[in-house]
Amino acid sequence: MATRTTASCTGSTLLQPLSEMINLPLDQVNFVACQLFALLMAVWFRIYLHPSKTSPFIRHVVATLLGFYVALFCFGWYSLHFLLQSGLSYSVMVFSGLEHMHKYCFIVTLGYLMLCQITRVYVFDYGMYSADFTGPMMVITQKITSLVFEIHDGLTKRESQLTPSQKYLAISRMPSLLEYLSYNYNFMGILAGPTCSYNDYMAFIEGTCYQPRHQENANGKENGKHQQIEPSPKNAVISKLCTCAISLAIYLSLCKVLPVEYILDEDFVRSTPFHLQVVYLYLAMLALRPKYYFVFTLADAINNAAGFGFSGYNKDGSPQWDMISNVRILGIELATSYKMFIDNWNIQTGLWLKRVCYERCPINPTAATFLLSAMWHGVYPGYYLTFLTGIAMTMAARAIRHNIRPYFLVSDSYKRIYDVTTWAGTQVAISYTVVPFVLLAVGPSLKFYRSWYFGLHLVCLLVVLALPVKSRRQQAKEEQDNLQDNQTEHKSTDNNCNQKDKAT
């Protein structure tokens, strides 16, 4: 196993003896080592290259060079793809017109990512779950596409055409090449992100990120008391590193005890009662998630250690460092709806999908968002099976919530019954949906669904047919129309009262 992984690893072999000693693939050892190195550099960056001590230019240069070094150590010459992707996209930004820049750049950036994914999967190592070079390219793709849409909003649209979040994110000038490279390749986020907005990153570089920029924070009483003091990320970083250690320990302890592939074993399917198969599926997926908790939380801790990620203060005056957090573990494990689970998982990717696709797609935005998510994740067929199933699950969950939930809000006891039931249903539905995402191939995925007789697919179909629900846009439009009608009624009532007063 170690030999095969070493051959497929294009990065440095400096840590090969350590890889063999702990019996872990070299590319994964390189990834963790580089993230720990980035954590140390983040502390140094915050202390010795503080905005009060040096210029934004120096901070941009150092962050970019350290990012290039980390990428070269992990991926070797494959990291040149990062430069090629960014260089092509920046050329499109500079030489194409503002009116269509975001569309062309979106196609070029996502197309280059998919080309690399196809080459890696179908030419080199199909099915290898390793730290491949397309992982950082996925984050860079998010950053570039977000950037071009924000530039398009800032330079071609009036404020009245933008939503409040789009107004905040809009960029009013074209970034310089150094700013562009620093945003995409800084050492805090080159390996695992998370994605952040360009405005937030520039505020961090320039040292203005501790000033209240969001309106809801700027008007808060607690912000008024603390906004002049630069908060320390020490407690947040220590807490997140403890979460990383616990997550890694749980994953290493359970991943081999509860393998997901066991659900395909014919003896297991034939001899195990169905309700125990459901329990095993849930536990297997539960044992798999800490790996992602470790990666997401460590990346968040690195950014916090550098001073990036401050989002305001709690009511008790303690600082919050969750502006670019990618996961809320309790929100996931205690989710009582499909949407709640998705909203707490890979948060920054969800925001990216919402900002570049869901809010802008004129036709069936839900299906378009799931399709974009599948294309962005990669070219394994299992990804597309997962996201096609996710569309059906989302529609069914929305119908149940809108039609059935109101009947359980009449008392606290009914509400608790509803929460427990929907928690169990959500966890089973999520586990059922993501099986192809883990198995990757079509054959094993369909074998699993056949063993369940495509049960949840049929349930979703029946629910959608029996409990129709309006789309979110239709609901928002109706609420807006009702609000306008109420305002009209109030105006007419006021006019009548004024006429009566004059008559009197």
Image (cartoon, rainbow, N blue to C red):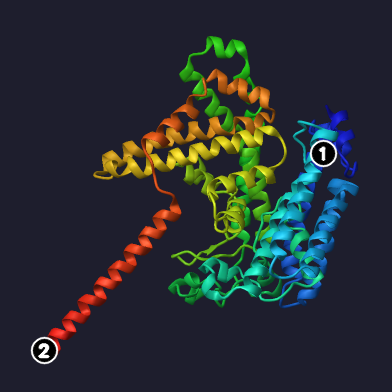
Say which of 123 and 32 sits in front.
123
Image quadrant in which you'd find residue 387: top right
Rendered location of residue 459, percent (x, y) = 44, 29
Q: Is any atom of residue 259 visible in this view?
A: no
Q: In which quadrant will I find the C terminus?
A: bottom left
Amino acid residing under circle 2:
Ala
**Few, some or many residues within 10 Å of mark 1 (<14, 14–19, 20+):** some
Q: Quadrant of the N terminus?
A: top right
Residue 414: image location, x then y, percent: 27, 39
> Which label sits in the foreground, 2 or 1?
2
Question: Label 2 vs label 1: CA separation?
Answer: 82 Å
Residue at x-position 57% and y-position 70%: 168
Q: What is the crowding at mark 2: few (fewer than 14 residues within 10 Å), some, or many (at least 20)?
A: few
Task: From the top left corner, tell me how far across and down residue 144 is, in percent.
Answer: 72, 60
Give the label on residue 503, or none. 2
Residue 30 in sight:
yes
Amino acid on which the number 1 mark rests in the picture? Arg
> Would residue 206 be found to the left or right of residue 367 on screen?
right
- Against 281, residue 364 (above or below) is below
Quadrant of residue 480 within the rendered picture: bottom left
